[in-house]
Amino acid sequence: LGILSAALGASTLTWVLFRALALLPRRLHLRGLLGTAEPLTDLYLDVDPERDHVRGPAEAPVTVVEYGDFECPYCGQAEPVVRELLRDFADVRYVWRHLPLNDVHPRAQLAAEASEAAAEQGAFWEMHDLLLDHQDALRPSDLIGYAEQLGLDVERFTDDLRGHVGAARVADDVDSADLSGVSGTPTFFVNGRRHYGAYDIATLSAAVRAAGARAVLATG
C-alpha cells in the first residue's frame, strides 16, 4: 500500500510539473524540458499587442520591453534614451510594463493606475510621457490635472482612479516581472532576452543591433 501511494504521488507530481511547463512561453518550455545550468533570464510573458502598451510598428523585428516605475529617478533618466532609441530605429517596438516599487516610491502605484485610467480613454502614452516628465508631481491632484491637460473625461478618469480600476492590470505586470526575475527598475528585455549593463544610448543601440542581426539569421 505504501509503495502504491508513493507511486501515485510521484505520478501526480510529474503531471503537475508537465502542466506547469506547458504554460510557459515556448522558449522557456523547451529550456525546462531540456535542462540548463543557466539562470532563467528570458521574458516570462511574451508581448501581446492586445494586452500590452506598445509603441512602434507591430511587425518590428526587435522589441524592447521595459519594466518601469513612474517615480523611479533612474526610469526618468532612461526615458530620454528610450525616446532617442525610437527616433534612431524605426523598426523597433517598445513596450512599457509596470513595476511600482511601493516600498521606496509611495506615489508610484497610483501613478501607474493613472496611466491605466488614461489608457481606458486611449491616452496611455500621453499620460506615460507626462508622468515621467513630472516625477516630482504625482499627487492625486497632479494626476487629475494631467487628465485635464490631455482633454480626457476628467470625471470618468477621477472615478477610475478612486476606484482603483487599473490596479489589477498593474498587478498583472508586477506578477510577470516577478516571474521574469525582475526586482528593480528600469529593467530592459530585448527580443525576450534580459539586457544587463548600462542603458545609455550607445549600449542600448548595440543591444538592438545585435538582436536585429539575430532576428535576420533566425528567419534565414
Image (cartoon, rainbow, N blue to C red):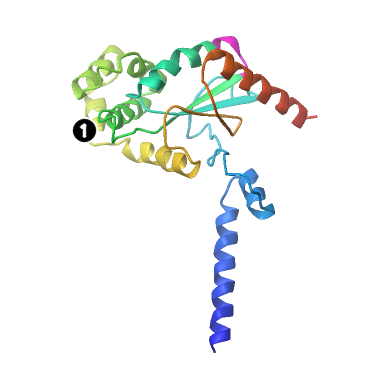
What residue range appears in magenta? Answer: 85-91
Above or below, 139 against 168 in this view is: above
- Front residue (pair 8, 181): 181
Residue that label 1 marks: 162
Q: Amino acid at mark 1?
A: Arg
**Label 1: how many Cα within 10 Å (few below 14, some 14–19, many 20+):** few
Task: Check the image and name the residue furthest to the right.
Answer: 220
Point out residue 192 in the picture as x, y percentages from the top left corner: 59, 34
User: Residue at 63% across / 18% down in the picture?
Assistant: 206
- Front residue (pair 162, 2): 2
User: Residue at 60% across / 54% down in the picture?
Assistant: 22
**The residue tagged with tag 1: helix, strand or loop?**
helix
What is the quadrant of the C terminus in the image?
top right
| Residue 103 left/right relative to 58 | left
What is the quadrant of the N terminus in the image?
bottom right
Point out residue 102 in the picture as x, y percentages from the top left corner: 29, 35
User: Residue at 55% across / 10% down in the picture?
Assistant: 87
